[in-house]
Image: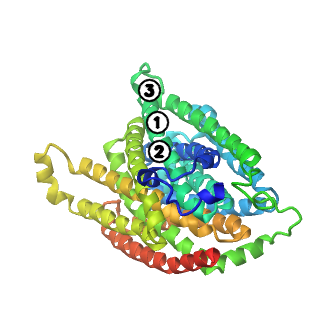
Amino acid sequence: MVDNIQGNGQEFGKMRRIFFPLYMYELKKALPMGLMFFCILFNYTCLRNIKDSLIVTGPGSDAEVIPFLKGYCVAPAAILFILLYTKASNIFTNEHLFYVTLTPFILFFGCFAFFIYPNLNVLHPSSETIALWRANAPSFLNWPIAIISNWSYSLFYILAEIWGSAIMALSFWQFANQITKTAEAKRMYAFFGFMGQISVLLEGKVGEWCSDIRTKVPEGVDAWGISLKYMMGTVVVLGIIAMLIYRWIYKYILTDKRFYDKPELPGNTKGKKKMPLWQSFKVIFTSPYLGLIVALVVCYGIGVNLVEGLWKKQIGMQYPNPNDYNTFMNQFTFYGGVATMIMYIIGGNILRVCRWFTAAVTTPVILLFLGSSFFIFVLFRDILEPLLRSMVTTPLFCAVILGASVVMVSKAVKYALFDLTKEMAYIPLDEEMKVKGKAVVEVIGGRFGKAGGAWIQSLLLLFISGATYFTIAPYTFTIFIVICILWICSVKALSHRVEAVSEKITK
């Protein structure tokens, strides 16, 4: 009976096809997957906001530190992670691999709030030591010195960045791709994302409440330290819940033939010889199909990073206090979650109605248009200053709000269309490529995308005397346009392969 129901979806009413194209029995699978994504995305959003607050407002630090962190710390850390992950994938089953991957992150973030941050005066170099370093070092080492002197903040930033690639983009979506058929993905993936965006809305309000603790504590009490304990405690609890849900899915969902009818559980390849590490990388790096997916991920990372760098510089100028900065970022997160939920409804219908190319190319086109508008505003803000002053506002505040709008809409489209079309491209691949190929694409490709933008900005900051984000903006704007055009070309090239593979599977 179930198989007869699962036709082309015409039995759904018009409104249900738009808002909830799932069969009731499918909730047994879709709901726990959505809840697991809820926990993972809540943590990612919380960590993303805090890492920026720590770095931009840290002692002797500023937004210009971010490209150096991304380019010269996060990228090497991502390479180390992927080597360990690929090796671990040959040792552990997929279920145990998830636990082994998630646990170190949870332990560190818990330790940071409850042990490291309360003892910064002992663990970080003193202000006198930092001043001595700066006095005896050339000026181009100012930002590396800021990274070292705030080493625990830098480590937090590195692991928070890798969480997005390792836990969300890799571990969750790899699992979803292994247990979901292409026909199901067109209906379920938007639901997973919608559930995840509910967590973004919740995190925005929780984070804002935690940051507002500063108004409720006595003078002299470190309100930021209290906020960190609340937020990192939540991260630890939700991380544990995600692991429990993962275990529940293995025990009760993958044993149900309606949802998973393969002879063995994902990654449980007992008795099958796995490729050696060097051979796995050889196959991965010589695959044109994966190469084009890497191109999409890298272009997205560079393009968004170029816009965000300039935007975060202005947020730091507008909100120099870490609690104020984090409050703004959580307000941004809340409204971004609303925009993304709306976009998931629109994007889910685009996925079902339009070709893969149409859905995938929407993100670079929108980012190109909106990002260009933001750069043009910043470059010509002095001309607009008299008009803005007459409207009782400032160019700085308008740049913060405009940048927030650009990033918010771009990420909403990215989550609702770019991510889902990218995940669908993995489904036809074999098990080895899904695990190790996706690991390379998401962790190394994703990190090198952001690192690419960071390297561009850091080199400009190093070699242009007295450079800031504002003075290098004309150069980064030009590079931004080129990257978006390359992105669109890569989508076009990959679309031919995706559609050819999909037609082959359906025959």
Whether residue 186 is situated above or below residue 256 in the rendered picture: below
Give x and y (percent) for residue 482. 38, 76
Lateral position of residue 427 relative to residue 401, left or right: right
**Helix, strand or loop at disc 2?**
helix
Q: Residue furthest right?
A: 271
Determine the residue positioned at 42% across, 73% down.
483
For residue 505, which numbered disc appears in the image? Answer: none
Q: In which quarter of the image is the C terminus?
A: bottom right
Q: How far apart are marks 2 and 3 (CA)?
A: 16 Å
For residue 49, which numbered disc appears in the image? Answer: 2
Crowding near pointer 1: few (<14 within 10 Å), some, many (20+)?
A: many
Q: Name the residue under label 1.
A: 207
Is residue 95 visible in the rendered image? The answer is yes
Give x and y (percent) for residue 374. 29, 60
Q: Distance between the residues labelled 3 and 1?
A: 10 Å
- The mark lying in front, picked from 3 and 1, is 1
Looking at the rendered structure, the kind of residue marked 3 is Ile
CB atoms of marks 1 and 2 within 8 Å: yes
